[in-house]
Amino acid sequence: MNVETEELADSQVALSFEIDDVRVERAIDAAYRRVSGRVNIAGFRRGKAPRALVERVVGRESLMEEALSELLPEGYAEALRTSEVRALTEPEFDVQSLKPLRARATVVVRPPVRLGDYRAIRRALPSATVAPSEIDSFLEQLRDSHAEWVPVERPPQIGDRVALDVSGTVEGRRVIRWEDEEYVLRAESTIPATGFAERVVGLGDSVTGSFDLEAPADSGGVFAGKTISFEVTIKDVKASELPALDDYFAATVGPYADLAELRLKVTEQLAERAEATARASLEEEVLQEATDSAIVDVPDKLVDQRTHRMREGLQRELDSRGLPIEQYLRIRRTSDSELESDFRSEAERSLRRGFVLQALAEEEGLTVAEDEVDASIHEAFPEDGGGSRPATRALPQDEIRERVRSGLLEHRAARWLVEHATEGSGASESSGAAPEQQEEQP
């Protein structure tokens, strides 16, 4: 295929290509067969009317449009392979002539990048320090996760767990009904409404009580922004009883000989976390400095495309949770326009950084082997156990391979940049496993 390329403004490239008449005629014939199976023509079953009659009924222009829907993407794919242009957007087609069929596909490509003096970036590797108060706080949280609830004969307090019957009405209509509900009284809790826990505590010695609370306008639900009238019955009160912080406690939460060994493991874990946090911050500083020192104009079409994909991803997530976008915006205390602006800012930022890292990889001769791309695709598309082989289908797809290759290359460039920036500053030692809070064993 003869392909002509033309560089346009805003990092766009136009690919002009021609498709021979024989291939066009075959595509029109295939279009006829598809169309004839969709239209009703008197005296013929669907798909049985002769082509000449179908052309008279639907028009040759309709058949040509149907044929072009197949020909243009096919011709464009061949033009990409011939020209080795790496398109970052879907093509915009312009049919320049029908006989012979000449078309032009305009795409956005990677913009030129002028790198700054990224080799001059220097940082010292972070050192991890853990204050004794942090260790004590972790151990207290560990104790709290192993606490027992014991009945008490006193009015409820913040931190207690109470069994409640609750009725909540709005304008005479019941909207909340709890029976024997186990509820932990937490300060500033917003469930079922802000101030509920505090008002239950305020009942004092009373077993029953009533009070009104206003639901925030952005809380969602049928009673958002309205006054809720509560009637509450307290059935029992339980307090949290913490275990003693001693050698026995250490042995019950994990394979520790005594409290000193548990404290040592906690110290190691907190040091690991502090080091990981500090290192992540350092890496972000290095990448941001390299990006800020580079000159690159990110095409608006790429920002639009990335923003659209981000919105689609959010919508899929909200749909899976059954959460309308309007309620999500209320929870986030933002507007649709603000959300769009945030997406655009993040899209522009991530695209800019990606282009800088790709340019840096080229400058430093960093590459990604094809077997690395294969391995990454296999990892991203695991087999589902039902005989489906998504990785097998994804492996030969040029678009997927290019996307995976770019991601691996950017990661490699980022790692090289951080290693170069911290070269000679020494490395921190990492520790072994340590206790986790909540229900996981230490």
Image (cartoon, helix red, strand yellow):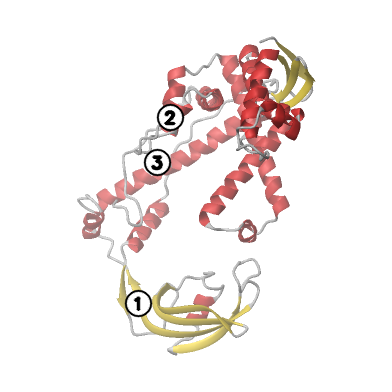
Q: Quadrant of residue 89?
A: top right
Q: Is residue 431 left or right of residue 225?
A: left
Which residue: 69% across, 9% down? Answer: 2
Q: Quadrant of residue 172?
A: bottom right
The answer to which of marks 1 and 3 sits earlier in the sequence is: 1
Amino acid type, callout 2: Ala
Contact (CB < 8 A) between labels 2 and 3?
Answer: no
Crowding near pointer 2: few (<14 within 10 Å), some, many (20+)? some
Residue 160, percent across and down?
Answer: 40, 74
Q: Label 2's element? A: helix
Looking at this view, is 131 or 102 the one in front? Answer: 102
The residue mark sitting in front, 2 or 3, is 2
Residue bearing the label numbered 3: 272
Residue bearing the label numbered 1: 238
Calculate the distance from the C-alpha at mark 2 to the C-alpha at mark 3. 36 Å
The residue mark sitting in front, 1 or 3, is 1
Residue 114, percent across and down?
Answer: 70, 20
Q: Label 3's element? A: helix
Residue bearing the label numbered 2: 391
